[in-house]
Image (spheres, helix red, strand yellow):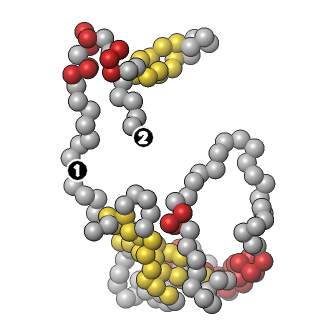
Amino acid sequence: MTLPEYFHLVNDNNKKAEWVVVRPEDVPVETGLAKVSFSRPIEDPPKPYVTPDHAESCWKKPGPVAGPFQAHPGDGSVVTYYWYRFADQPALLNADLTDKERESLQARVEKLHRNWKKDRDYLAPPTIGKLADVDPALIVTPPPGLEAGYVPIATRQAAEE
């Protein structure tokens, strides 16, 4: 899909300002805009997103229980992820929770994972708006034995080489 390059500001029937698309051939010559190029800027490739890698970081201690795995979303990048025990994921290790509170969360998540199946709705669908789409490549399946109480955590995203 190509987005339009030219727009014109008009007032609709309710006197509300609204931008409407103008075809390139309908751009007034006196504006000089038809001769302007709106090409993409030349940019350096994005730097990879990488989580901390030192051995004592919360990403490594206690660390993941499985991985690395890779997903290839439609944006051309590669996402590297690992499976962590829910209570041992870095976000919860830094959430100022006691060990007892984290273990209580772990037990609840395991119960949810065992009992909430994909074929049911657990929350009412929205009455307005539209739910976002998720790239299907990012819907991952846990390795055998990690179906309950474990979550995938991305640790790196970079352009596909």
Q: Quadrant of the N terminus?
A: top left
Which SS class for mark 1?
A: loop
Q: Residue at x 25, y 37 (%)?
A: 39
- Residue 123 lies, in percent from the top left, at 77, 59
The one of 94 and 26 positioned closer to us in this rendering = 26
Q: Would you say 38 lies left or right of 3 here?
A: left
Q: Would you say 57 lies left or right of 131 here?
A: left
The one of 25 and 93 positioned closer to us in this rendering = 25
2 or 1: tag closer to the N-terminus: 2
Mark 2: few/some/many CA within 10 Å (<14, 14-19, 20+):
few
**Residue labelled with disc 1:** 43
**Residue labelled with disc 2:** 1
Which residue type carries mark 2?
A: Met
Q: Residue at x 62, y 12 (%)?
A: 14
The quadrant where residue 46 appears: bottom left
Question: Marks 2 and 1, Cα distance to the nearest angstrom?
Answer: 21 Å
Mark 2–mark 1 CB contact (< 8 Å): no
Q: Nearer the viewer, mark 2 or mark 1?
A: 2
- Residue 37 lies, in percent from the top left, at 23, 30
Mark 1: few/some/many CA within 10 Å (<14, 14-19, 20+):
few
Q: Quadrant of the C terminus?
A: bottom left
Which SS class for mark 2?
A: loop
Q: Would you say 158 lies left or right of 129 here?
A: left
Q: Residue at x 73, y 48 (%)?
A: 126
The one of 82 and 37 positioned closer to us in this rendering = 37
